[in-house]
Amino acid sequence: MQVKDVGEFGLIRRWERELAQDPEQVAQGIGDDAAVLDFPGGRQILATTDTLVESVHFDLAFTSPRQLGKKCMAVNLSDIAAMGGRARYALIALGLPGSTELAWLEDLYRGLQEEASRWSTWIVGGDTVRSPSGLVITVTVLGQVPQGRAVPRSGARPGDLVVVTGDLGGSAAGLASLTRSPSPVEPGVLEYVRRRQLEPIPRLAEGEIMAHHGASAMIDVSDGLASEVNHLARLSRVRVVVEEESIPMAPATRTLARVLEADALAWALNGGEDYELVSTVAPEQFAAMARAVRERTGTCLTVVGRVEAGAGCYLMKEGKRRRLEPTSYDHFLTTSGPSRTSP
């Protein structure tokens, strides 16, 4: 059996079962957005890491070094957001071709530092090695959360609402605009979707507020809404039903889909890299949560579905259900096309 026979998510499930964990200090290990580690003084530490590889996760033909640095930091901060935590420290490991220009590398670090500073996160170390074939960037972020307050993927309960921050599909629209040369569109359309692709914003403030207001489960949208709700359903052992008409998409995303004759819904469900948050919450707690998030961050929360007893995920349209299966990128089962970061 080879890695390609089980795929990226199959590997993660094997590691969940087989890798040893310290039961006294590891409150949540492999399988969530970040590990949760118990520390003295009533605190828990969050730990997450992601690797981005040239030509797999990013294309230097349309990504500036500053944008790349910001994005590498943001995708890791998003994992801390999905746990309801606050980011504190980061470490950077780089694999660089020897021909890398120093000025280019300095711009990359400016982007990393800019995004980290925006969220009061300190870069405290890392490693640099020579890479024989392209740029490889690994960012590790440590955060913190009050004891017992980390929001897992496994806490959804029948009767909960499924809610998302912001809008979905914009990042995939941005990638399409960079690779497919669309016809002229209204001012601001390309600017919006390309910013969503090249400079995503981690929802750290929103995640912390949602955790405080009763989020029972949470995950960030790195691989598309379909993939994320399937993770929540599997780990929570529940059924998730998503209302197609309720999925929020920005006007710019819908406009570009029309221009390119693309499917905006497919971008939202499977495009990935939006780095919005998907959460579940009891109906009686939603209004207070949405109000607090809007007042303190300006971000809207949208109810996109509900949690039921059962298993699996379904997409509802005009009263009819169909199975909602993830078709997002898998590093080992997909052999070409743009990638998404791992959960």
Image: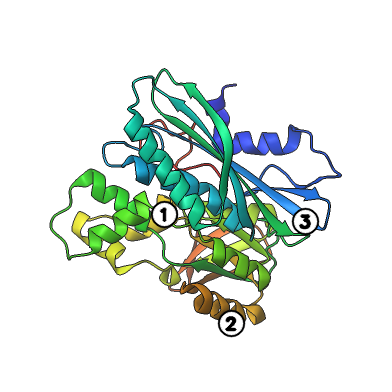
Considering only vertical position in the picture, is 138 above or below 99? Answer: below
Q: Is residue 121 visible?
A: yes
Considering only vertical position in the picture, is 141 above or below 260? Answer: above
Dots 3 and 1: beta carbons under 8 Å? no
Lower position in the chain sequence, tag 3 or tag 1: 3
Considering only vertical position in the picture, is 164 above or below 85? Answer: below
Q: Position of residue 228 (x, y in %)?
A: 54, 54
Mark carried by residue 200: 1
Give the residue type at disc 1.
Pro
Give the residue type at disc 2.
Ala
Lower position in the chain sequence, tag 3 or tag 2: 3
Mark carried by residue 287: 2
- Callout 2 secondary element: helix
- Callout 3 secondary element: strand
Q: Residue at x 71, y 39 (%)?
A: 16
- Mark 3 to mark 1 CA distance (whole Å): 29 Å
Mark carried by residue 314: none
Q: Which residue was labeled with disc 3?
A: 43
Q: Is residue 141 left or right of residue 320?
A: right
Q: Residue furthest left?
A: 184
Nearer the camera: disc 3 or disc 1: 3
Q: Is residue 223 visible?
A: no
Q: Is residue 185 left or right of residue 300?
A: left
Q: Nearer the viewer, residue 100 or 290?
A: 100
The quarter in which the C terminus is drawn is top right
Q: Residues within 10 Å of mark 1 (few under 14, many from 20)?
A: many
Dots 3 and 2: beta carbons under 8 Å? no
Nearer the camera: disc 3 or disc 2: 3
Lower position in the chain sequence, tag 2 or tag 1: 1
